[in-house]
Amino acid sequence: MTHTPDPNSPGPDSPERAQADFTRSLSYGDYLHLDTLLSAHQPLTGAHDEHLFIAVHHVSEVWLHLINVELRAAMRALEAGVVDAPLKGLTRVVRALEQLTQAWEVLKTMTPADYLQFRGAFGAASGFQSANYRTMEFLLGNRHAALLRPHAHRPDLHAPLSADFHAPSLYDLALRLLAERGLPIPDEVLHRDRTRPPTPHPEVLAAWLTVYRDPERSWDLYELAEKLLDVEDNFRRWRYNHLTTVERTIGFKTGSGGTSGAGYLRRALETVLFPELWQVRTEL
Ligand code: HEM
């Protein structure tokens, strides 16, 4: 005789078995502070697409925050001479950058007319003032003093940004590691002015060439170099997709943050974070 389960009795896979009393333990929403998170979603107009605009910015900020956590952890490990853990963390950064880049696909469903319905509401606010984004750029080594200025009104943001602005970047730490491994990195590079982006140096190129010509000899350094390149590669994609989204939404109007808009973003596409890692390909 076959046993037919009673459809009305809660079986082992029934949702009725789930935890339902949260008087003494954290619920999902409590743990994630979802009330706080979602209370930040506050459109200023009744325009339907402002929801999308805010959501994509929020999601992007959350990814940027995670990227910065990972970059800092990777940098701490590199500083201690460890390479394996940073490789894992930087892989996460690469994947998170992919997610950031994908977000443009959702935002691109907004037409210029949709955008104009709420553009007037946020005045001079712009991603240019994103402290999370600027932190990521500073950690990656793209530094210009002018980029600190929009944060002057918020000492709580300005102070940590300023500290990152003056501290060694991810690339500085990678070069320091090369020196510790006996590769000849000149003092002028190891003690360079960190408040500017790195300028390509022939001896740094020569050091990377040594690594690339014989990867087996220092496989971890070789992997680190390729991982840094993955980070920059994916970051470039984000920049490019931002520019395209901006051009199709506002054309060549000036930006809400006061720059020339698409022109400023196009120029940023020329940024090179790890110059010798791109040059080394030519020399091989
Ligand atoms: C239709 C949507 C968007 C438009 C029209 C737009 C437009 C612009 C423009 C014109 C700039 C140049 C600075 C200025 O405002 O003068 C800029 C910068 C920036 N935007 Fe957007 N943006 C959009 C969406 C986003 C989103 C979703 C993010 C995600 C966080 C973002 C992040 C940034 C960042 C970080 C910068 C500074 C880039 C740099 O300094 O290299 N933007 N945006």
Image (cartoon, helix red, strand yellow):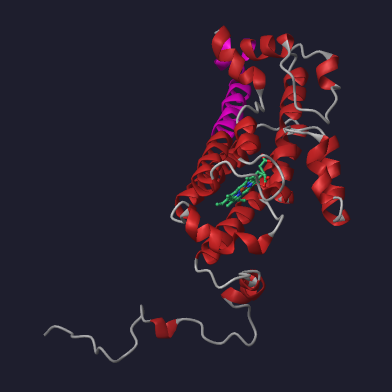
The answer to whether 102 is drawn above or below residue 173 in the figure is below
Vertical position of residue 38 compared to residue 131: above or below: below
Viewer-closest of 114 and 95:
114
Residue 177 is situated, as x and y percent measured from the top left of the image, at: 74, 24
Residue 214 visible in the picture: no
Q: Give the quadrant of residue 33.
A: bottom right
Q: Nearer the viewer, residue 163 or 252?
A: 252
Residue 162 falls inside the magenta stretch:
no
In the depicted structure, whether residue 75 falls above or below residue 45: above
- Give how far across and how far down residue 118 sits, in percent: 58, 63
Identified at 71% across, 50% down, the residue is: 130
State the image coordinates of residue 129 (x, y, percent, origin top left). 73, 50
Q: How many marks?
A: 0
Residue 103 as seen in the image, left or right of residue 187: left
- If the image is split into quadrants, where does the N terminus sit? bottom left
Image position of 200 with respect to 96: above or below: above
Task: State the quadrant of the C terminus.
Answer: top right
Q: Position of residue 31 (x, y in %)?
A: 63, 72
- In the image, is 32 to the left or to the right of 98? right
Residue at (59% x, 13% y) in the render:
280
What segment is highlighted magenta in the picture?
210-233
Q: Is 232 a magenta residue?
A: yes
Residue furthest bottom in the image: 8
Q: Quadrant of residue 143?
A: top right
Asked whether residue 37 appears in the rendered view, the answer is yes
Residue 197 vs residue 156: left or right? left
The residue that appears at 71% across and 9% down in the rendered structure is 202
Using the rendered view, name the quadrant where residue 97 is placed: top right
Most prominent secondary structure in the magenta stretch? helix
Q: Is residue 183 left or right of residue 2?
A: right
